Image (cartoon, grey):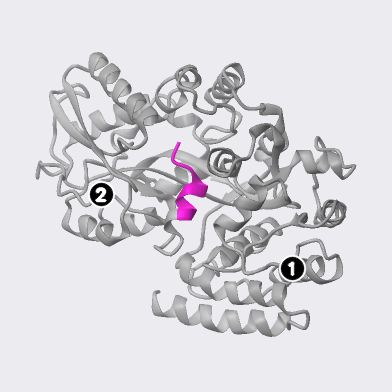
Amino acid sequence: MRTTSHRRALGLLLVAGLGLVASSCGSGDDEPAAQSSGGADAKVTITVGCQPPKSNPKERTAWDEDVAEFQKLHPNITIESKDAFPCINPDTFQAKLAGGTQEDLFYVYYTDVQKIIKARQAADISEYVGSVKTLKDLRPDVLGVFKDGDKTYGLPRTNYNMGLVYNRKLFTQAGLDPNSPPKTWAEVHEAAKKIAGLGAGHVGFGEYSAGNTGGWHFAASLYARGGTMVSEDGKSAAFNSAEGKAVLENLKQMRWNDNSMGSKQLLQWEDLMRMMGAGKLGMMIGAPDVVQSVNNDFQGKFEDYGVTVVPESEGKASLAGGDGYMFNPKASPDKIKAGLLWLEFHELTPGEGQFNYQRSKAQGRPVGLPIPDLYGDTPPGKEITALRKQYATVPVEHFAPYANAQTSITNKLEPPKAQELYAVLDVAMSAVLTRKDADIDKLLADAEAKANKILERNS
């Protein structure tokens, strides 16, 4: 799985995302999408972006096996896979979109979808998407990312929202119940103090405040409290609010009154991951795939960690993200129909493609993380959950507090001009964590003024 945390590490300074390879392979067909065509299995070749690179042999092998199986099921359809690492390159992505040279099925992050739709750089697939058998079961908020009114322009591949990652081993050592993680920020305070009290080097709660990561986590905490980053029309900042003030007040208290956040601040992505992997950090905000990254890249162990939802987010919202595929506006109806068959097979069918957990387990890949969540509590969602449990290689029960609360949380996407706004809010986050006398009202007012200029300039 191409994870959210890996994306954050590689792309924070590159506009909240990576980008497609700089290949010049487009649809290879200038036939307008409105032209009539044959059935879904008409003889056709389609190019598909984001094949895993050779440097990731397990995922590459799984992809190639799926292409071969799909082409046996649909012998008239040929898949031409286009590999890239990263899948999106900001230096070439916009140029490819503008020139129409992207793949027939091109890979996108949620944050880019609406801009692509408004610029008419993706095909309207509304006429054909009803052929996808599980379409009606997709979470409305997830499918809605790819819609504009009643028109559909793509389909999701992954979906996640933020949670609270915690070290179960440290919880036990501090006399806390790892099966009952904090639900409120007051409970986080108490747990953090006890973990920090374990001895030198232990940090109860860690937070980012540099490299755009501080503003990113400010948004996550703000959404969980019921706040929002921008106005409904996206033209002005909305974070200078009671909820925004509460985010900073909370951190200021933990840093200076509770002494549970440690003295080392101005932390970025890798810093907290390294601390979590070393067994010195009690809690941090992050999606479930943080645990996978800590295990794979920072010497942590899956069994030592758990994930719950961001405190106080139930009944409110959680910062969400994900990715999916859209269609080249030059793609013919046959290409669109063939592409939908591929997406249904590889991205949306329990037991197949990305949900072939039996194969993932055989390959030694982790199984059991509660992402992606594309279907919620519908029949396909329940089937996927059962398969995850059946073939799990990680302790599924450690993620139950996160998974069980998802039906009460609304996914909320990153704001427009997210990275620029995050950079502005880094200043406020770093100030409250490094200055005991930081003036929260002034910090938010200054950030609001700068954010309004950004949003006005780009509206």
Which x, y percent locates residue 432? 71, 75
Which x, y percent locates residue 371? 55, 36
Q: Residue drawn at (64%, 34%), measured in percent from left and top?
A: 302
Residue 263 — which label?
1
Q: Is residue 87 left or right of residue 248?
A: left
Residue 11 placement: quadrant: bottom left
Across the whole image, how many numbered discs are drawn on residues?
Answer: 2
Is mark 2 in CB contact (under 8 Å) with mark 1?
Answer: no
The answer to whether residue 433 shows anywhere in this view is yes
Q: Is residue 241 left or right of residue 326?
A: right
Rendered view: 41 above or below 226: above
Queried whether the magenta region covers residue 228, the answer comes back as: no
Name the main secondary structure of what is drawn in magenta: helix
* Magenta residues (range): 1-9
Q: Residue drawn at (73%, 83%), measured in percent from left and top?
A: 439
Q: Residue drawn at (13%, 30%), measured in percent from left and top?
A: 37
The answer to whether residue 318 shows anywhere in this view is no
Disc 2: which residue: 21
Q: Is residue 90 left or right of residue 335?
A: right
Residue 28 placement: quadrant: top left
Q: Classify mark 1: helix, strand or loop.
A: loop
Q: Looking at the figure, which quarter contains the N terminus?
A: top left
Rendered view: 155 above or below 60: below
Residue in the foreground of this view, choosing between 324 and 256: 256
Q: Looking at the figure, which quarter contains the C terminus?
A: bottom left
Q: Classify mark 2: helix, strand or loop.
A: loop
Identified by mark 1, the residue type is: Ser
Give the crowd class for mark 2: few <14, some 14-19, many >=20 residues within 10 Å.
many
Which x, y percent locates residue 218? 63, 64
